[in-house]
Image (cartoon, rainbow, N blue to C red):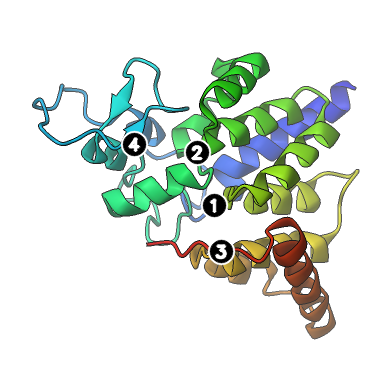
Amino acid sequence: MAANRTIAAVLVLALAVGIGYWALTQQGEAVGVGSAEQGATSAPPESTEKPVAQAESLPQSSLRVTAQDLARKYECPGADVDCANSPNVASSAEEARWLLDHGYPTLAQIRDLSSRTTSDYESEYRRTGSKVAQTLWALSLSTNDELTNAVGILSESIQGGNVFAYYVLSDVYMRSPHYANLTTSAGYMRAAYLAGDPKAGTVYQQKYSHLSPVEHSLADKDAYQFFKNLGKGRNYPRP
C-alpha cells in the first residue's frame, strides 16, 4: 500500500511538474507557483465589477470573486514559465472562467493538494458542484491508495464537462504501473484536444512525438472513443 501511495504522490507531482514541465522550468523548479493562487501581496483596490462566480474551490476566504480576481488566480506565475503553452494558465478573464468551469486547478492548488483532506474536497464538490473541487477530490483520492476510485470519478466528471480530467487520466495511464498504457495515455490527451483545448495538442507533441505511426493511429482511435463515449462528443472551445 505504501508503494501505491508513493506512486500516486508522484502522479500528483507530475501534474505540477511533469504534466506541466512546460509550465515550470526545465529543471523542475517551481517558479512563483504561489503567485498564481494568491496574486499580489498587497490588497488590490476595491473593485466595482459585478461578481461573476462563486469562489468554489478557490480560496475560501472570499465567498465570491470578480472576473479580475479570477484572472489573477490563473495568471502567469513568472517569466521563466512557458505560459503560452501551460494548460493551467490563463491570459484573460474569459479564459480563466473557462478553466474554472472545466475543472482546471491552478498550479498552486495542485502543488498544495495535501494542505486539505480528501473529505474537504469531496464536501466542497458536493456543496458547490465545482469541477475544480471534483478534480482535486480525485487527485487527493489517488494519493491515498484509491486510484481506482479516482479514475472512476474522473471518467464520470468528463460527462459533465470536466476537460482537465482528460489530462489527469492521461498522466495516470502514463505513470501508474497498474494502468500503464502509453497509447491510452496519448489517447486521453488527444481527447482533451477534441474537447476544445488546443493546448492539449501542444502537450501531445511534447510528450508523444516519439510514438510510431501505428501507435499514433491507436491513440487517435482511443481518443475518438473517449471523446464520444465519455465526453458525449461535446466540444467546449477554449477562449
Type of the residue with mark 3? Ala
Q: Nearer the viewer, mark 1 or mark 4?
A: 4
On screen, residue 235 versus residue 96, left or right, reads right
Q: Sequence order check: which comes first, mark 1 or mark 4?
A: 1
Q: Secondary structure at mark 4?
A: helix
Q: Position of residue 144 (x, y in %)?
A: 77, 22
Give the labeled residue for mark 4. 73
Q: Secondary structure at mark 1?
A: loop
At x 80%, y 75%, the residue is 221
Judged by depth in the image, the label closer to the viewer, 3 or 1, is: 3
Q: What residue is disc 3 on?
A: 200
x, y percentage for residue 108?
45, 32
Q: Any mark on residue 105, and which? A: 2
Label 2 element class: loop
Mark positioned earlier in the residue sequence (3 or 2) = 2
Q: Position of residue 109 (x, y in %)?
A: 49, 31
Is 106 situated above or below 133?
below
- Residue at x 66%, y 53% (from the top left corner): 166
Q: Element type at marker 3? A: helix
Please name whichever residue, 64 or 135, is drawn nearer the observer in this view of the structure.
Answer: 64
* Disc 2 crowd, CA 10 A, few/some/many (<14, 14-19, 20+): many
In front of the other: 195 or 23: 195
Q: Amino acid at mark 4?
A: Lys
